[in-house]
Amino acid sequence: MSLFDMNGPLMYNLGKLANIFLCNVLFCLFSLPLFTIGAALSALFACMQAIWDEDEDDIIAKQYWNAFKQNFRQGTAIWMICLLAAAFLGIYYFIVTSMTGTMGRVYRISFFMMCVIFLFGFQYLFPLQARYRNSVRNTLKNAWLLSIAALPWTVLSILLTAGAVYLSFFMNPNGVSLAVFLWGTLGFGIVAYLNSIFFNKAFQMIDPEKLEAAHEAPSEALFIDEEHAGFF
C-alpha cells in the first residue's frame, strides 16, 4: 500500500485533522458574538464526539452548523448561567481578598472550593448538551453529578485543558502570538477531541451498553435524558 493511498492510515488521519481544523475555525467564528459561545461549544463537542466515534458527516461544516442550530437556545441559556456564576465568583474574590485574619483565610478557602466545584461541572455541561436531549435544569444537575461519579476522568479532563493553556501561553510568554494562532486553528478542536476520550469513559456511566447510535440511556443508568421514562 502506498504511503499516500487515499484509504491508507496517513490520509485517513489527515482527513480527521482537517475536520478538526474546520470545526475549530467554525467554533472561533461562531463565538465572536460572545453570547453564542455556549451553542458554539456544544456544536464543537458534538462534532468532536462524532469524529471520535467515526460518525462524522462527509461535510463536517454542515454537521457543525446543524449542531449549532439544534443547541442554540439551550446552549446559550447554559452559557449565560455560567457567565453569571463566573461574575459571582469574581465579585466574591474581590470581597474575600480584602478580608484579613482567620475569617479571611476561611473565606479564601471557600472561594477555592467554589471554583473547583464550578470547574468540575463546567467540564461536562456542553458535552452533555451536545449528546443528550434534556432540559437546562437537568443538564446542569447531571453535569455536576457526573463530575463526581466520574471523578478520575473529570480530573484528567481539567488537567489536560489546564496543561494545554499553560504550555501555550505561560511556558513562553513571548510566544503569545503563536499561541493565539495555534488555538485559532487547532487548539480548541484538539483539546475537545482529546477530552472526548475522557468524556466517553464518563458517559459509559450514563449509557453503559454504549448505545451511541440512539444516544439512549438504559433504565439502570445513573442519569437519564428527558426523552425517556425513568429519569429523575
Image (cartoon, rainbow, N blue to C red):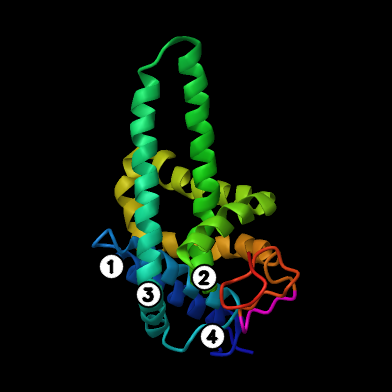
Residue for point 37% across, 61% down: 77
Residue 187 seen from this side: yes
Q: Are marks 1 and 3 in contact (CB under 8 Å)?
A: no
Q: Amino acid at mark 2?
A: Asn
Q: Are marks 1 and 4 in contact (CB under 8 Å)?
A: no
Q: Element under label 3?
A: helix
Looking at the rendered image, the quarter that the C terminus falls into is: bottom right
**Which quadrant of the figure has residue 68?**
bottom left
Q: Residues within 10 Å of mark 1 (few under 14, many from 20)?
A: some
Between the residue at mark 1 and the residue at mark 4, the CA separation in whole angstroms equals 32 Å
Residue 190 seen from this side: no
Q: Element under label 2?
A: loop
Residue identifier under label 2: 134
**Which quadrant of the figure has residue 143?**
bottom right
Q: Residues within 10 Å of mark 3 (few under 14, many from 20)?
A: many
Between the residue at mark 1 and the residue at mark 3, the CA separation in whole angstroms equals 12 Å
Between the residue at mark 4 and the residue at mark 3, the CA separation in whole angstroms equals 34 Å
What is the magenta range? 209-214
Residue identifier under label 3: 68
Residue identifier under label 4: 4
Nearer to us in this view, 99 or 123: 99
